[in-house]
Structure formats: structure tokens, C-alpha cells
Amino acid sequence: MNNLARRNRQTAIVLLIVVAVLFTLAFLEVRQ
Amino acid sequence: MNSTAHALPHPALPHGFWRWLTTTNHKDIGTLYLWFAATMFLIGGSMAMLIRAELFQPGLQIVRPEVFNQLTTLHGLIMIFGVIMPTFTGFANWQIPLMIGAPDMAFPRMNNWSFWLLPVAGIFLIGSVFLPGGAVAGGWTMYPPLFLQGGISYDLTIFAIHIMGASSIMGAINIVTTILNMRTPGMTLMRMPMFVWTWLITGFLLIAVMPVLAGAVTMLLMDRNFGTHFFSAAGGGDPVMFQHIFWFFGHPEVYILILPAFGIISSIVPTFARKPLFGYTSMVYATSSIALLSFMVWGHHMFTVGMQASAQLFFMYTTMLIAIPTGVKVFNWVATMWQGSMTFETPMLFAIAFICLFTIGGFSGLVLAMVPVDIQLQDTYYVVAHFHYVLVTGALFAIFAGLYYWLPKWTGHMYDERLGHWHFWLSAISVNVLFFPMHFLGLAGMPRRVSDYAPQFTDFNRVASIGGFVFGASQILLLIVILKCIRGGPKAEARVWEGAEGLEWTVPSPAPYHTFATPPELE
């Protein structure tokens, strides 16, 4: 895997984590 | 990226259906997005025509009230998720790699998957019309308790929203990654074209709010099918909580629908004024401020739910603050035109109409931001007038402008300027006949989402309907212009417009299937 592909994958993983956190937060907001 | 990869023998491209199904080329996928959006525009537009036909006079003429509610609901969902968002994603696919000098998007196979999810979602959404009980009818905002009570089509709609959300998230991750990592050497962030900047910010907005929408509709799905009570008051849940979560998505969504439009206008105005964009840096900061503020204003959609006065004041002031960065943008466009050598080809006409008419929508937004006024106008036609000025003469007119601007680059032919002018003038006049009277209807107290109305509203409704029919019919001209342009016409040069700047104008027209296999040199 070349550098650009690795950097692209890392960026995507970070953004996906943001997605997962926000999805979870929506549920936590209602539970309160 | 190196040039040897390009020299390798190319596997033969599949033809016909397989080519489009399996393509990973950003230009192909951009084209797919645009045609998908055009199809949905036809369907959502036909629904609007039916709505305006029913409202041509009081009483029930054409559709039953429950069908009318399905029409307004589907019209909203289709136009937002099926037309405006996919069109901007189509523009992004075509233009962003060309503008930043990248050979393709960062994740070409995910790009294919993002697109092909959309027709599936579209079929679920529209197909639900034929299910027992008809399609969803509670409004595009999907508020409980209504949304908890409907039939199977409500579940199907939730599924469609999930699919479209997944498609949007993948698209946004792809676009953000492409912009952050694949710019040609020397293109720093502050040297990017404004369209790329607005899409970068839009991408972040999508990544931030689509999961929240997905969470909200997942909870609806669970309330409907798995015995939970997130939003059902009978089980101790809170229906108003849904509104909070929905609008925490919904307001940034409004900017997702308009920021790429700002980017298109910021590309077109300098080209036809033959001057660089006035205040580039302030444009970038204004766009970012609008995006940040969009997370702090959601309460203005629900002033009448019974929130505290302090919360109402907070949302009122934050909403009014948005006028500042938006004003910066409008003044920058005007300053760009000031003393420019302007010509008025169709893209510029639509761009100028955008600046004037979007501002009307912005001003009525300020009126609605005032709590005491909003309490009077909540759920009236004034709101309908406001958001149609923002989304039709705003987002849609920017789309028209962008289509005329880039069509020669995509097809290699110039479009028919005379027909383009006809399309512009018919649209620009009729759209005001259609939406301006709605302000008066709203101020006089006509509620939105009704199939019948009191007789005193008849005259303005007639005027609006006539405007609507002309506006709808004039879009046939656009289709003719596009088809004519694809089939032939005068050959377009690489730099289609005399005043156009940017990397996309350095490649031939039509843009070759593969561009920038080696990163281009910046001046």
C-alpha cells in the first residue's frame, strides 16, 4: 500500500469514528 | 501517482449497463448522480404540480386529503434527499478532482457504492405509494406521534432514509479525504477554488449530522417495531425530544443544501465579471462561521413547543447572527461584479438571480427568527414561501447556473444560448409568481400542508398555481437544452469561458476519461 492510500485510509477511519460517536450520542441524549 | 501506471495497457471498458454499474470513474459517477437527480426532479416536480392543481381553488378537486398529505411529504423528501443533495454530489464528483488536480476520488469503489445505494432508496421511497395505506403522510420531518402510527410504508421510508444516510456519509468521507489528501503539490488550502472549500465544509457538516438523523430514525423504527418508548408519551417517552434531535440534524442540513450553491456562485460571478473573487479569505471564514453557527440554531424550528423564554432568546439571537457571514458573502459577490467587464450568459443570469432572490429568502428567514413573529407564522404559508425562496431560487437556481457553466466542459459542446435565455427568463419570472404570493397567504393565516382552504385565500392561490405551472413547464426547456448539448452543437474550447480560471479549464472539452494522471503544475 503506498503512502497516499495509507493516508486516505487513516483519514477515512478517523471520520468513521466521528460518525459512530455521533450516532451513539443521539441515543444517549434521549436516555437522559 | 506516477506516469508509468498510466502507460500500462488498459483493460477494455465494459459497455452499456455494466459500464455504468461497475464504474469507478469520478466523471461517470458524477454523471450518474446528475441523471438520478434529474429523474427524481421530474417525479418530485410532478407531485408539486399536483399539489398546485389541487390548491388552484378551494374544496377538493383532484386528490383526497390523505393523498395530498402523501404528496407534500414525498415532495419534500424527494426534493431534499433525491434532487438537491445528489446534484451537488454529482457536481462534486465531476469538478473536485478536476479543480484540485487529482486523478480521481480517494475511494473510487466506495464512490460507486455510494451512488448505487441511492436508486434503491429512491425505489423504496416512491414504491411505498403502492403499499396498503399509501406512502408516508406526516410531513418530511417525520414527527412522532404521527410517524409512530402509520403502516408498513413508514418502516420502508425509515429504511430508505438509512440507506440515503449511509450513501451521504460515504460520499462525504470520500470528498473530505480527496480534498485533504489529493490536492496537486502547491495547492494549499487557501489556494483552493471556493467550490472546493464549500464542499469541504459541507462534507464535515454531513459527517456530523447524518449519524444523528440515522440515530433518530433508528429510535423511531424501534418505537414502531420493538416495543421501546423513546418518543411515545404513552410509555414515558418524549415526542418533543425527537424534534430536538431531528432539527439538530435539520438545520445543518439546510446549509448542506446551500453551501455548495454558494461555491458555484463564487465560481461563476468572477468568471463573467472578469475579476478575481472579492474577499476570498473572508469567504472562507464566512462559510466556516455559517457551518459552526448552524449547530446552534435548531430551536428556531420549534419555538412553539413550549420552551423557556431564555432558550427562545438564545436561538433567536444565534439565528440572527447567521445574517452576518451570509451578508459578507452577498456583499463579496456584489463587490466582485463592481466595475467588472460583465457579460450575461445564462450561468451569470442564474447567478445574479440567485443573489437577488436568495437574499429575499434570507430576509424572510430573519423575520421568522423573531420569536413573537414566528409564533404567529409557525406552520403558515409564510414558512413555505421562505424555504422555497431559499431552496428553489437559492439552491436550485445555483444548480441551473452550475449546469450551464460546466455543461460545455462535460459534453464538449456549447449549449443553445437562446434556449438558455428563454429558460432563465421563464423560470425567473414564474418562480416569483409562484412563491411571492405565498408570503401574503401566510401573513393572512393560511396554514401549510392543507388540501382545502377558506375562500378568502383563493386569489393568491390561483396566482401561485399559475406561476407553478409555468415554472414546471419551463423546466422542459432545460431538458431540451441538455439533450441538445449532449447530442451536438458548436465545439467547446478547453477554456470555455473567457474569464474562467482554474485547473478544470486546462483540460480539453469534453474532459478526457482520465485526467491528471500526473499532478499538474500550478502557476
Image: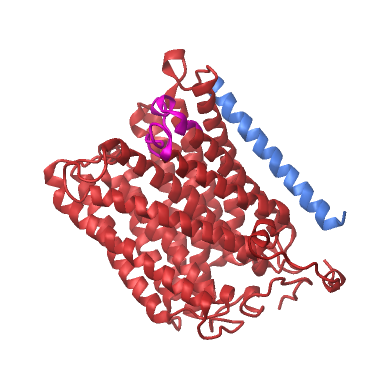
On the image, the x and y values in percent for residue B301 come to 39, 38
Tint of chain A = blue
Horizontal placement of A24 versus B489: left or right?
Answer: right
Q: Is residue B346 magenta-colored?
A: no
On the image, the x and y values in percent for residue B267 come to 53, 70
Location of residue B370 by image quarter: top left
Which residue reaches farthest top?
B235
Tint of chain B = red
Q: Residue at x 44, y 31 (%)?
A: B243
Observer-nearest of B273 and B112: B112
> Please, is residue B404 above or below residue A8 in the view?
below
Numbered label tally: 0
Location of residue B297 by image quarter: top left
Horizontal placement of B13 versus B403: left or right?
Answer: right
- Of the 4 image quadrants, the one containing the N terminus of chain B is bottom right
Observer-nearest of B308 and B225: B225
Residue B293 appears in the rendering: no
- For the record, the magenta segment spans B130-155
> Please, is residue B397 above or below residue B419 in the view?
above
- Of the 4 image quadrants, the one containing the C terminus of chain B is bottom right
On the image, the x and y values in percent for residue B47 come to 35, 50
> Please, is residue B2 above or below residue B389 in the view?
below
On the image, the x and y values in percent for residue B293 come to 50, 45
Majority secondary structure of magenta residues: loop
Q: Is residue B136 magenta-colored?
A: yes
Which residue reaches farthest left?
B456
